[in-house]
Image (cartoon, rainbow, N blue to C red):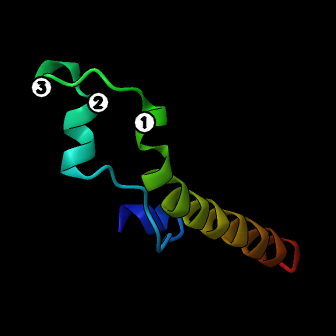
Amino acid sequence: MIAVELQMVPVRNAVHIGGGDFWKLHPGMGGSGEMADIEAALVPSAKATLDDLVWWAKATMAAHKSK
């Protein structure tokens, strides 16, 4: 309910870092990798999430202008 009151919209996609990739990066868990090491796993979901965000931005701006 709070999200609706803040005029937030749902975004279908999300970027998740899987457990194996997380362990590669997290220094407290023995990892020492860089984000670039897992970039290939993140790019498709990041692109889908950003595409959703752009779609919603355009849709909400159009709806706002028509008021």
Quadrant into which the N terminus falls: bottom left
Could you give the CA–CA distance between mark 3 and mark 2, rounded to whole angstroms? Answer: 8 Å
Give x and y (percent) for residue 41: 43, 54
Given this view, does label 1 or label 2 mark the residue nearer the observer?
1
Q: Kindly indicate whether the residue at mark 1 contacts the one at mark 3 (C-beta within 8 angstroms).
A: no
Identity, as a three-letter code, of the amino acid under mark 2: Leu
33 relative position to 57: left or right: left
Is label 1 in a helix, a strand or a loop? Answer: helix
19 relative position to 17: left or right: left
Identity, as a three-letter code, of the amino acid under mark 1: Asp
Is label 3 in a helix, a strand or a loop? Answer: helix
Above or below, 62 relative to 15: below
Q: Give the residue drawn at x 66%, y 67%.
A: 51
Give x and y (percent) for residue 23: 19, 36
Q: Which residue carries the number 3 mark?
A: 29
Given this view, does label 3 or label 1 mark the residue nearer the observer?
1
Local crowd at mark 3 within 10 Å, few (<14), some, or many (≥20)? few
Q: Which residue carries the number 2 mark?
A: 25
Q: Using the image as rendered, state which of residue 11 and residue 4 is in the foreground.
A: 11
Q: Using the image as rendered, state which of residue 56 and residue 39 is in the foreground.
A: 39
Quadrant into which the C terminus falls: bottom right
Q: Using the image as rendered, state which of residue 42 and residue 12 is in the foreground.
A: 42
Could you give the CA–CA distance between mark 1 and mark 2, rounded to whole angstroms? Answer: 8 Å
Local crowd at mark 2 within 10 Å, few (<14), some, or many (≥20)? some
6 relative position to 62: left or right: left
